[in-house]
Structures are given as C-alpha cells and as structure tokens.
DNA sequence: TAAATTCGCTTGCAAATTGCAAGTACAAAT
DNA sequence: ATTTGTACTTGCAATTTGCAAGCGAATTTA
C-alpha cells in the first residue's frame, strides 16, 4: 500500500516513486481538467479504476502533497479533492505527455483540439492554465 | 508480461499504458544519458532492476517502438540498445520530470548542475540534446 | 418519520505482477 | 581446455492489482 522507499537519488527515479504507476497521473489529469473532483467523479472516468486502488492512490497523492482533501461545501457526505501547488506544477509534464501521445497514439478529436491550442503557444498556455488552476486552490 | 490493452482513448492513459510503470522511464533515462547501453549497463544503474523485469521491459519498449536492439560492433555476445526517434521524443517529458523533481525532491548536485543548464534555455537545450541523440540513431 | 439511496470508502479473495536467486547457452578471454 | 562475461530464462515466494460485495454515515424520497 505504501510506496515509501526511495530506490535511488535520481530525480527521475524519485519522481516515479511518487506518481510513477498506472493510475496516479490519471487522477491528476482528472483534477486538472475538472479543477476539483469527488471520489465518485474519479470513478466515473473512462478507465474504470477499482475502488480500493483509487482509495490507496488518493491517500498516497495526499501524503506526498500533490492533492488535498476538503469538505464539500454543499454536503457533509461528500469530499472534494483538489490539486495543491505541487500538483499544479505537474502541468508542464502533463502537457508534454499529451504532445507525445498526439504524435504517437490515436487521440480523440476532442482532445486533439486542445492539443492544437497548446502547440500554438506552449509557454503561454501553461501559464494561463496554471493560473486558472491556482485560482481554485 | 504484455501490457497490450488500452484502458481508454485518453492520450495520457494510452501513454501510461506504454511506459507508465516504475521502470520503463528509467531505462529511457539511461539511454538518454549514455546514448546507448548494453543489458549489463542497465543492470549497473543505482536502482538495481531485477533481471527478469529488465528483460520484459526492454521487450515491451522495443515492441512499442521506443527502443531498438542492435548487434554490438565489437562483440557477438553483446547487444546494443538505442532510442528510436519515438524514444528521443520523450526528451521534453524527461526534462519536465527533472524540473519538477528539482523543485520537490532532493537531488544530487551532479544532476542539479545539468538542470541549471536546462533552466537557462529550455527549448534550446532540448533542441541541442535531441539533435545529439538523433545523431547516434 | 421510515425506507431507500447516495457517498466514500473497506474487506475478502483470486489473479497478475514483481522481486529474488539461481541457472542456461553462447561468446570471448586465459 | 577452462574459466569468465554476456544476455537472458526459470522457479518460486511475496507483493500488488482487480473484482465484487459490504458497510456506516449522510441525504433524499415516500
């Protein structure tokens, strides 16, 4: 459950120790697109993550300071998950993943449009999007 | 052994299906730093990947066209692994991982120096490094 | 106000993956 | 001719994943 051991001092290795599994970055993706999500929102995503895996990943991401939990303003039974500044700083990485996939994977036209926007002015797009996300924190 | 099933149409998800495990990007990292590696070179890395995992990851990365195998020019018993263009295109992603880790993980001073170079002129650095890697293909 | 539903998890268990240690086949060096 | 180096493979135990169901509290519905 806890992936708390550092394999080496390499920055890549240390990063992968934190979010280098099949699910964590999908959670981050959902939060970047939606700004905030409930537990149920994550479960609605196309990849259909198992409930126990979702719970353990959310806990890990929270422990490593990438996301945070907040009470839902409208309901005591709901929880809101949000990205922290540390999580928002994964945006450039997320953009590069999309750009790579745009070149080498088959992408939905919906997402393709967004990637086109990024290509026009990558730095500008990241700044704008990052600012938007930070306003929600 | 084979992670050949697509979880969804999302570019992030599809990318993670290919290289989204704890080891693949470390193999790519080694190749980016060294230009080319033998099986034994990978095993010498700090993270001490198990031999069977290394073999299976190398196979997967080759099947997905990110790396390629070549006969070693000096020995029939050795094999050279190299990045393909598709693998080299992971460089911007790799750079962003390093930049994120530079901000949030504890990094060795050796790698810190390299990251400083990147920060001065990211685009320029990527172009230069990418060109260098492509000259080895 | 009682019953049903939603919500965020947890639990049990089978299946898949990982990690370790040792082994194998071929090439190269001694 | 024997030992060493190289790229893997194999067997097996331990961990992780994935599925299905369950659970307690909050909320909605009848």
Image: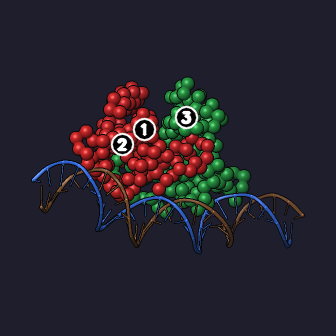
Chain colours: A green, B red, C blue, D brown
The residue carrying pointer 1 sits among few (fewer than 14), some (14 to 19) or many (20 or more) residues within 10 Å by Cα, namely many
On the image, the x and y values in percent for residue D24 come to 68, 71
Q: Which disc, if any, is residue A102? A: 3
Q: Chain of mark 2?
A: B
Q: Which disc, if any, is residue B37? A: none
Q: CA distance from mark 3 to mark 2?
A: 25 Å
Q: Residue at x 38, y 38 (%)?
A: B83
Q: Chain of mark 1?
A: B
Give the labeled residue for mark 1: B87
Taking A33 as reference, is B48 left or right? left
Which residue occupies the foreground of this view, C26 or A68?
C26
Comparing marks 2 and 1, which lies closer to the viewer? Answer: 2
Q: Quadrant of residue B93?
A: top left
Secondary structure, mark 1, is helix
| First-in-chain label (2 vs 1) | 2
Q: Residue at x 42, y 27 (%)?
A: B123
Q: Residue at x 55, y 38 (%)?
A: A105
Q: Which disc, if any, is residue B69? A: 2
On the image, the x and y values in percent for residue B50 come to 35, 58
């Amino acid at each position: 459950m806890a992936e708390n051991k550092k394999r080496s001092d390499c920055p890549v290795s240390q990063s992968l120790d934190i979010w280098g599994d099949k699910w964590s970055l999908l959670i981050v993706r959902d939060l970047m697109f939606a700004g905030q999500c409930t537990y149920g929102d994550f479960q609605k995503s196309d990849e259909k993550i198992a409930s126990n895996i979702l719970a353990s990943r959310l806990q890990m991401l929270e422990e490593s300071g990438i996301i945070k939990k907040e009470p839902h303003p409208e309901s005591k039974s709901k929880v809101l998950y949000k990205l922290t500044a540390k999580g928002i700083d994964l945006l450039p990485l997320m953009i590069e993943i999309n750009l790579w996939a745009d070149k080498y994977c088959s992408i939905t036209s919906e997402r393709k449009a967004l990637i086109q926007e990024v290509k026009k002015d990558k730095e500008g797009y990241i700044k704008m999007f990052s600012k938007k996300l930070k306003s929600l924190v």
